[in-house]
Every structure is written in structure tokens, then in C-alpha cells.
Image: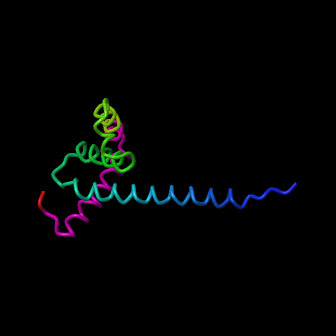
Amino acid sequence: MEVDLGPQIISDFSIRKKRTRRRLASAVRFSDILQERLIPAFSAKEIITHIIIAAIEASFGANFTSGKGFDKMVGTIVETIVTNSNFRRQALIVSSYYIEKKLKNGKTNF
């Protein structure tokens, strides 16, 4: 008995293509949010808070950030990152990239 997998393969490819587009759109949105919101005067904790919120907004939408318990969830994640030197360093490297990019683009109205 021969099974035709053509339609299934095409369907799987379409699903993967849509997921890739969504991930790319989320990454672009994340980048835009960080470039817009991060400023050099922020403390490490403030920077990490903005990174976490940007990641969640980019992935799930801004409405998700207004949900019950959101602030507590973000606070828990931020404390974990702030107290882990490797995570904190990575977050600060990411923030430096976006702050420098913002400065190079002439956006200095902090």
C-alpha cells in the first residue's frame, strides 16, 4: 500500500514557514521596543525589567502585560537575572547594544 505524503509535507512546510514569520516579527518587535525604551540612566534592575517586559510584549502582545499577577511574575524573573552574574552580564550586553544603536541614530531625547 502506497501512501501519498505530498499534501502532508506541504502542510508541514506551510506551518513551519508561518512560525518562522511569527518568530521574526516577534524578534523585530522586541528590538524596536528595546531601542525605544532603554536609556543610559537606567539601573541594571530597570534595564532588565524593560528587557523582560519587551520580550513578553513581543511574544504575547501588550495586553498580556496588564494581566493579574504580571508585575509579580516580572519581578521574580528580574530578581533571578539580577542575582545571577552570567544572566545579568548578558542582559547588560544586550542593553548596551540597543542604547548605542539609539545614540548612533541620533535619538538622544532621554
Quadrant of the rendered image containing residue 28: bottom left
Q: Position of residue 86 (x, y in %)?
A: 38, 46
Observer-nearest of 16 and 102: 16
Residue at (25, 65) in percent of width and height: 101
> In the rendered structure, does residue 85 fall within the stretch colored magenta?
yes
Extreme-right residue of the structure: 1
Observer-nearest of 83 and 51: 51
Q: Quadrant of the C terminus?
A: bottom left
Q: Position of residue 58 (x, y in %)?
A: 35, 50
| Colour treatment of the image | rainbow
Q: Quadrant of the N terminus?
A: bottom right
Residue at (18, 49) in percent of width and height: 42
Relative to residue 71, is residue 54 depicted above or below? Answer: below
Q: How many marks?
A: 0
Image side of residue 70 versus residue 3, left or right: left
The span picked out in magenta is 80-108
Q: Position of residue 62 (x, y in %)?
A: 30, 45
Q: Position of residue 102 (x, y in %)?
A: 22, 64
Residue at (31, 49) in percent of width and height: 54
Residue at (27, 60) in percent of width and height: 98
- The secondary structure that dominates the magenta segment is helix
Quadrant of the rendered image containing residue 85: top left
Relative to residue 61, is residue 75 depicted above or below? Answer: above
Extreme-left residue of the structure: 109
Observer-nearest of 8 and 61: 8
